[in-house]
């Protein structure tokens, strides 16, 4: 069962589940607030708890607001682009033929037809990002299927507004944010493990935290690092 309440300018999404304790979270990048409470908890009690943590909520939301963001990409020569946590300079070569992307130790080169609009350049780069993720993900999933004793039926790549990943427990699949291509590979692995552990435990309860501690002891540091990296400049309002 889910409820929503508002206090001041903050909307809190409340979910009642079979958990022992209340879990309050503020999610990047836009500061969405969620609260998971035991099923027997009254809504007014959950509300009072959230209000008691108002200062903490505001601090977390302000941190996301102040977090550095990439400037909008124009896909022009010598523009900075990120791949696996490293900075590269973009080179753009206009020529007839099928668009493609190559990379060396210093630069990413985009081959594109003359006069192509920025939307086409963005699409070519995004498709290249997805190909790289498709190369990296199967081996990561296989590695952790063996460690966790679970099976991922399938995975999907998607641009996401508020999440780095998600898991469909019933369908046994996971969904990964394509923006992770810009982050260090160990942070991609952290997200993959996080979502795969949800195949063992759907909620963020004590058992989930225990499993994270057991398999990725440094997961809190990984989460902090991921949330401190500059956010994408995608305009999600379009």
Image (spheres, rainbow, N blue to C red):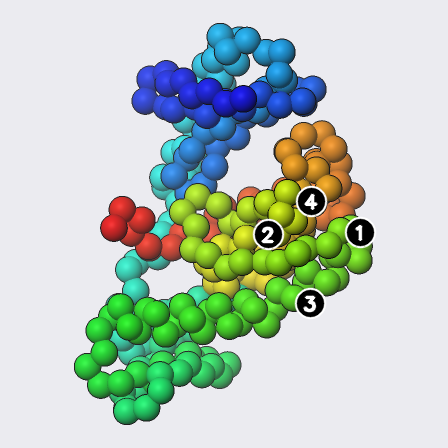
Tag on residue 174?
2
**Which residue corresponds to mark 1?**
149
Q: How far apart, in angstroms, are the residues tagged by discs 3 and 1?
A: 15 Å
Q: How far apart, in angstroms, are the residues tagged by discs 1 and 2?
A: 16 Å
Q: Where is residue 64 in the image (x, y as percent from the top left)?
A: 41, 40
Instruction: Assess disc 1: are there few (<14), some (14-19) or many (≥20) residues with their C-alpha within 10 Å of its C-alpha.
Output: few
Q: Which of marks 3 and 1 is nearer the N terminus?
A: 3
Is disc 1 placed on a helix, strand or loop? loop
Seen as rendered, the residue at the extreme front is: 171
- Tell me if label 3 and label 1 are in contact, CB under 8 Å: no
Seen at 33% across and 17% down, the residue is 8
Instruction: Assess disc 3: are there few (<14), some (14-19) or many (≥20) residues with their C-alpha within 10 Å of its C-alpha.
Output: few
Of the two numbered discs 3 and 4 in the rendering, the one whose residue sits closer to the viewer: 4
Q: Earlier in the sequence, mark 2 or mark 4?
A: 2
User: Does residue 157 sit above or below 172 in this rendering?
Assistant: below
Left or right: 5 with respect to 155?
left
Tag on residue 199?
4
Seen at 67% across and 22% down, the residue is 18
- The image quadrant that residue 54 belongs to is top left
- Tell me if label 1 and label 4 are in contact, CB under 8 Å: no
Q: Position of residue 177 (x, y in %)?
A: 49, 55
Tag on residue 139?
3
Is disc 3 placed on a helix, strand or loop? helix
- Tell me if label 3 and label 2 are in contact, CB under 8 Å: no
Q: Position of residue 41 (x, y in %)?
A: 59, 11
Q: Which of marks 3 and 4 is nearer the N terminus?
A: 3
Q: How far apart, in angstroms, are the residues tagged by discs 3 and 4?
A: 18 Å
Seen at 56% across and 69% down, the residue is 134
- Tell me if label 1 and label 2 are in contact, CB under 8 Å: no
């Amino acid at each position: 069962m889910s409820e929503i309440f508002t206090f001041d300018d903050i909307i809190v999404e409340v979910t009642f589940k079979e958990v022992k304790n209340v879990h309050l979270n503020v999610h990047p990048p836009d500061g969405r607030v969620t609260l998971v409470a035991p099923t027997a908890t009254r809504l007014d009690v959950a509300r009072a708890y959230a209000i008691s943590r108002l200062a903490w909520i505001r601090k977390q939301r302000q941190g996301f607001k102040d977090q550095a963001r990439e400037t909008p990409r124009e896909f022009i020569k010598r523009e900075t682009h990120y791949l696996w946590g490293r900075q590269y300079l973009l080179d753009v070569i206009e020529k007839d033929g099928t668009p493609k992307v190559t990379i060396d130790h210093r630069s990413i080169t985009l081959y594109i037809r003359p006069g192509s609009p920025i939307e086409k350049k963005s699409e070519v780069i995004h498709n290249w990002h997805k190909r790289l993720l498709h190369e990296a993900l199967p081996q990561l999933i296989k590695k952790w299927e063996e460690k966790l004793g679970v099976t991922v039926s399938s995975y999907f790549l998607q641009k996401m507004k508020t999440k780095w990943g998600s898991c469909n427990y019933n369908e046994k699949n996971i969904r990964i944010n394509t923006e992770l291509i810009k982050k260090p590979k160990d942070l991609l692995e952290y997200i993959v493990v996080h979502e795969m552990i949800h195949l063992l435990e759907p909620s963020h309860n004590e058992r989930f935290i225990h499993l994270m501690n057991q398999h990725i002891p440094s997961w809190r540091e990984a989460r902090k690092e991921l949330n401190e990296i500059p956010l994408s400049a995608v305009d999600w309002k379009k």
